[in-house]
Amino acid sequence: MIHRTRAFITLLLLGVMMATLSASVFGQDATAEPTAEATAAAAPVDPNDVCGPLGTPAVAAALAAKTGKDLSTYTGKIGFIFVGPVDDFGYNYAANQGRLCIEAVLPNVETIFAENVPENAEAERVMEQMIRSGAKIIFPTSYGHYDPAVAVSEKYPDVTFFHMGGLTPTDHVGSFFGEIWQMEYAAGVAAGMTTKSNKLGFIAAFPIPQVLLNMNAFELGAKSVNPDATTTVVFSGNWCDPAVLAEAANSLIDQGIDVLTQHQDCPKPVLEVADRRGIWSIGYHADASAVAGDHWITSGRWVWGPLMLDLVTQGIDGTYKPALLRVGVAEGAVALSTFGPNVPEDVKAAAEKARDDIISGALYPFTGPIMKQDGTVAIAEGEKPDTPTLETTNYLVEGIIGTIPQ
């Protein structure tokens, strides 16, 4: 399963490369009128295209090549549940872009969705309602939707569930997620080079393993270019509470922090406080540069469309087997966002080099030795834990200031 999906995303990249090579290597007549297909392939891609940086036409062409089918033959109804609003410029926005990509590429597939679905029995009720309306595939998109999804799946074994971020797949619930910690490391590189006070701030929601992993990756990235950099962490206890986030941002800035980042579903409140107070900000989940102002640096972002499409076509074709799937920047599932207009060129270059070295394999950010806050060994020298192991993280690394709530 992992290899099939990696192959699909690689096929997308190859498709774009071949479109370029066909004009330069295979001797296209420069004086001839371009065909409609060539014009579409040459058109610049909107970086916020619902299917990601490759663009919807390229993604659709690659999926058709992989499946060998007319994509209009795919039919059915798919349900999505989101823990917050889809216009949050963050987690739910990014996941909804994946839903919109499915609609764009599979014209006869219907999607339905519900926003602000809590991580409790209400999620079960919403998913069951979707199933009764005809949905045969469900995307529970929040970490806390896992238990409700498992409960509902036991009642409806003919429905396929693709849970985002779950750690343990079941007979009927598969788990997929992107290795966004890779881009948190690259963003940390940018933060470490940008700070003047050597004080970075990180506002997180809950101390779940994936959040702690991102915090650690960010600090390790910063320290790789600035050994004096520290990251002060605050936990908000909520995926999105604008008032709490604004208060936390102001409190950190009052402590002398001059680069602020986060792991929240709605980055906008933190970005706005940072810009208003004249300090640098790094987002999360999506490209929020449009609302971040002049002090935006960059962010790690999700590119869900191609991955969701691959899963959906497998689900409709009946070939999907629930599994634990993790893919990263090399497969196109995560990316660095646009850099802000005032980010120095050397900062951009360093962050992009970190990204490129991760893609090539020249860099693995969690190569030991890595120490915990208390000075004990977290990862022994020479060890390189895989992503499933990293997603059991229950500690903070040396250089992070703050404690994990109990």
Image (cartoon, grey):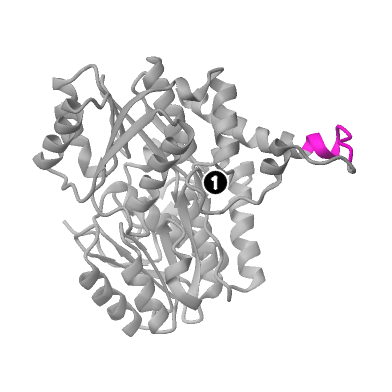
Q: Toward the viewer: 388 or 141?
A: 141
Residue 172 sits above or below residue 80 on the image: above
Say which quarter of the image contains residue 258.
bottom left
Q: Which amino acid lies under the numbered mark 1 shown in the image of this protein? A: Tyr
List the residue tagged with mark 1: 364
Q: Toward the viewer: 123 or 393?
A: 123
What x and y, as percent, mark residue 238?
20, 59
Side (left or right) of 33 relative to 312: right
Q: Residue at x 57, y 53 (%)?
A: 46
The reply to whether residue 385 is visible in this rendering is no
Number of labels in the image equals 1
Q: Toward the viewer: 369 or 361?
A: 361
What x and y, as percent, mark residue 127?
18, 34
Side (left or right) of 256 relative to 330: left
Q: Residue at x 24, y 59 (%)?
A: 404
Could you tell me which quadrant the N terminus lies in?
Answer: top left
Q: Residue at x 21, y 17 (%)?
A: 157
Say which quarter of the image contains residue 126.
top left
- Find out whether residue 138 is within the magenta segment: no
The reply to whether residue 53 is visible in this rendering is yes
Magenta residues, as a range? 21-29
Side (left or right) of 284 relative to 43: left
Could you tell me which quadrant the C terminus lies in?
Answer: bottom left
Q: Secondary structure at mark 1?
A: loop
Question: 10 Å neighbourhood of mark 1: few (<14), some, or many (≥20)?
Answer: some
Residue 97 sits above or below residue 389 on the image: below
What x and y, as percent, mark residue 327?
47, 37
Side (left or right) of 202 relative to 386: left
What x and y, as percent, mark residue 241?
21, 65
